[in-house]
Image: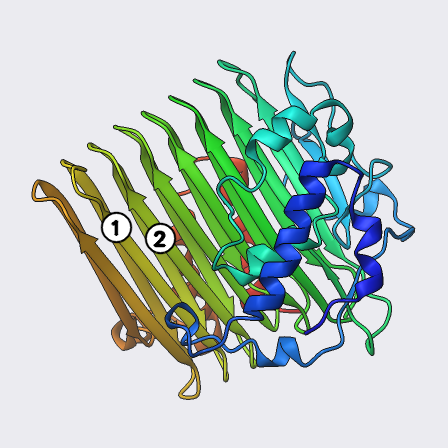
């Protein structure tokens, strides 16, 4: 996969530090190339199909849309979200509705923020998502053209969620589009916010979304970060989330994946202060020849950190999924409490799951555990429902929904939980 050389110049806004960062990103990607299964972290996911397509960087487009037609996970009739809309990675102010924000809060497109907030961006961009050794971060950095900035002053509470709607609108199946947005969140001490990402396709042309997020949570900051990816079956979706939590900060994340030909969510969070907490859950539902990869690293670098992970997967037909979850406890991170659970349902003999949970512990006063199970639907439960007059398809759907909703129930925002349940139900009853 070789990006178009003529795209380089238009992606640089004229800031020397950013030009240098982008140049280094392109250089590192040229050295590294796409990851291959020869690398341990990519042993179960082959990006060969992605590399063989003639991708071109998505230009700023003029796709005609109206705000009322846009997808949302925030139900109509309720309190509106602070919404930013992106088409092929480009921020569309004409479709966005950030609304009234508390004093000092910054919510805008990343490129626009460089005018008034260049110092804030320079201090954070690329600090967590370093290009060394990570090809997809290097690629994102080299072609960084847009994204979102959310900055919260200390003590600020956003009552309404921030919603990032990211839509792919390819125009040419022969030369598909790629986009590389960056999401930057800088949450001041004691601040609170909810961030919802919604990734969807507007047509069936293939697209390649390569996203990177950098999350900086100051002492006591609390961030709820929910994501749904339901792009079309020809799309490639690769996302890397990096985060640093200072003392007593808290992060709650949820990943719901139903779309994409090949998708990977990689989440790397560092508990960089005593008493930090992470809750990271998710569900994936895939069928056909879809490939879904979930890779996590929770790095307990200080004492009294707590992390919880629960992921549920449902695979049908010839779908394949990967779960790689690592909990790292560094020396001195005493009284760490970490738990990880992954469970998958295989609805077909051709479906396949590779699960690789890991604990790496370098402290002696800790409480850590992990578990992984793979199986089919419970025959006794299925028989119980059938015996009460429920047909087989409906009984299977009820059991699968109950299985998935156990994870979705961990979402503490009831509006988002209800929306995610509806999306999961839509997968179970297509058409």
Foreground of the two, 263 or 387: 263
Residue drawn 47% across and 63% down?
284
Estimate the spatial distance between the alpha carbons at disc 2 and disc 1, rounded to whole Å: 7 Å
Residue 379 % position (x, y): 28, 77
Farthest residue in the bottom direction? 349
Badge 2 marks a residue whose secondary structure is strand
Foreground of the two, 69 or 101: 101
Farthest residue in the left direction? 364
- Circle 2 packing at 10 Å, graded few (<14), some (14-19), many (20+), is some
Q: Is residue 106 above or below residue 408?
A: above
Quarter of image, res 388: bottom left
Foreground of the two, 372 or 68: 372
Q: Quadrant of the C terminus?
A: bottom right
Q: Quadrant of the N terminus?
A: bottom right
Quarter of image, res 105: top right
Q: Are marks 2 and 1 in contact (CB under 8 Å)?
A: yes
Residue 131 appears in the figure = yes
- Residue carrying label 2: 297
Foreground of the two, 26 or 261: 26
Residue 328 bears which disc, if any?
1
Q: Is residue 70 left or right of residue 292?
A: right
Residue 237 % position (x, y): 61, 63
Q: Is residue 299 left or right of residue 349?
A: left
Q: Is residue 218 above or below residue 214?
A: above
- Circle 1 packing at 10 Å, graded few (<14), some (14-19), many (20+), is many
Q: Is residue 272 left or right of residue 53?
A: left
């Amino acid at each position: 996969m070789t990006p178009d050389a003529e795209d380089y110049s238009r992606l640089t806004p004229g800031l020397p530090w950013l030009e240098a960062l982008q140049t280094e990103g392109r250089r590192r990607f040229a050295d590294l190339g796409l990851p291959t299964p020869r690398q341990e972290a990519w042993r179960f996911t082959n990006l060969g199909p992605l590399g063989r397509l003639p991708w071109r960087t998505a230009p700023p487009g003029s796709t005609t849309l109206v705000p009322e037609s846009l997808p949302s996970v925030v139900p109509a009739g309720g309190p509106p979200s602070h919404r930013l809309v992106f088409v092929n990675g480009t921020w569309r102010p004409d479709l966005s509705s950030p609304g009234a924000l508390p004093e000092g809060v910054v919510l805008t497109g990343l490129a626009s923020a460089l005018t008034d907030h260049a110092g804030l961006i320079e201090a954070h961009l690329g600090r967590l998502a370093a290009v060394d050794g990570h090809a997809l971060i290097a690629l994102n950095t080299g072609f960084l053209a847009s994204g979102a900035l959310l900055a919260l002053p200390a003590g600020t509470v956003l009552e309404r969620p921030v919603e990032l709607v990211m839509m792919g609108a390819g125009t040419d199946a022969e030369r598909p589009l790629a986009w590389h947005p960056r999401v930057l969140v800088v949450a001041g001490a004691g601040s609170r916010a909810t961030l919802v990402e919604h990734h969807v396709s507007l047509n069936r042309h293939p697209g390649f979304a390569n996203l990177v997020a950098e999350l900086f949570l100051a002492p006591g900051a609390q961030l709820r970060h929910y994501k749904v990816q339901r792009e079309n079956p020809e799309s490639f979706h690769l996302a890397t989330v990096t985060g640093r939590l200072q003392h007593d900060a808290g992060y709650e994340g949820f990943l719901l994946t139903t779309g994409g030909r090949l998708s990977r969510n990689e989440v790397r969070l560092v508990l960089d202060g005593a008493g930090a907490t992470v809750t990271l859950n998710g569900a994936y539902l895939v069928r056909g020849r879809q490939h879904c990869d979930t890779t996590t690293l929770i790095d307990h670098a200080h004492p009294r950190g707590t992390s919880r992970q629960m992921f549920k997967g449902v695979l049908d037909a010839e779908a394949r999924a990967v779960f790689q979850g690592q909990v790292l406890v560094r020396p001195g991170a005493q009284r760490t409490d970490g738990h990880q659970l992954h469970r998958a349902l295989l609805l077909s003999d051709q479906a396949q799951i590779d699960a690789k949970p890991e604990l790496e512990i370098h402290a002696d006063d800790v409480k850590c555990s992990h578990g992984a199970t793979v199986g089919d639907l419970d025959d006794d439960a299925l028989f119980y429902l059938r015996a009460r007059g429920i047909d087989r398809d409906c009984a299977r759907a009820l059991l699968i929904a109950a299985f998935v909703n156990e994870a979705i129930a961990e979402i503490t925002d009831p509006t988002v939980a209800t929306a995610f349940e509806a999306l999961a139900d839509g997968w179970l009853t297509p058409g």
